[in-house]
Amino acid sequence: MTKREQNRRYRSKYPEKVRELIKRSYFKNREKRLKNKKEHYKNNKEKYSMWSRLNYLRKKGIIKLNKCEECGTEKQLVMHHEDYKKQFNIKVLCRSCHNKLHKLLN
Ligand SMILES: [Zn+2]
Ligand SMILES: [Zn+2]
C-alpha cells in the first residue's frame, strides 16, 4: 500500500480527525503568517506610511509623474526614494531605469 492510499484510507476512516488536523494547522500557520506580516510592517513602518502619503498626494494631483528623469519615457513610472528619511526626496523613473539604478545600488 502506498502512502497516498494509506492517507486516503485514513481520511475516509476518520474524517473528523482529519478535518480537525487541517483546521489546526491552518490556524497555526495563520498566526505565524499574521505575525510575520505584523513584523514586516513594523520594520517598514516608515516606508509604508510615507508611501501611503505619497499615493494620496498623487491621487490628489499634487505630485505628478510625467516622465522618467533618466530616459524621458512616459510609461510605467515609479517613484524612487533617494533617502527614505527625507519624504519628498523622490525621483521619477520608469521601471527599467529604476531597476538599473537598484542594480547599481546593490
Ligand atoms: Zn527611464
Ligand atoms: Zn527605488
Image (spheres, rainbow, N blue to C red):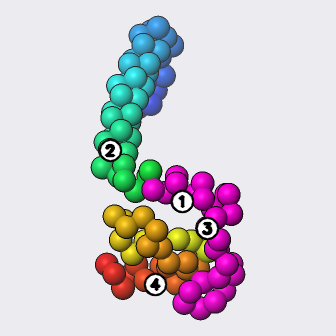
The answer to whether mark 3 and mark 1 are in CB contact below 8 A is: yes
Write down the residue under mark 3.
63
Type of amino acid at the residue the image marks with label 1 = Leu
Write down the residue under mark 2.
42
Type of amino acid at the residue the image marks with label 3 = Ile
What is the C-alpha distance between the residues marked 2 and 3? 26 Å
Tell me, yes or no, whether the highlighted magenta stretch contains residue 86. no
Write down the residue under mark 4.
100
> Can residue 87 be seen from the camera position used here?
yes
Tell me, yes or no, whether the highlighted magenta stretch contains residue 64. yes
Which callout, 3 or 4, points to the residue nearer the camera?
A: 3
Residue 90's x, y, as percent?
A: 47, 73
Q: Earlier in the sequence, mark 3 or mark 4?
A: 3
User: Horizontally, is 73 left or right of 84 in the view?
Assistant: right
Towards the viewer: 49 or 32 = 49
Q: Residue at x 67, y 57 (%)?
A: 59
Type of amino acid at the residue the image marks with label 2 = Lys
**Which secondary structure class fits the magenta region best?**
loop
Write down the residue under mark 1.
54
What is the C-alpha distance between the residues marked 3 and 1? 8 Å
Residue 105's x, y, as percent?
A: 33, 81
Q: Earlier in the sequence, mark 2 or mark 1?
A: 2
Question: What element does badge 3 sit on?
Answer: loop
What is the C-alpha distance between the residues marked 4 and 2? 28 Å
The crowd level at tag 4 (other Cα within 10 Å; few <14, some 14-19, many 20+) is: few
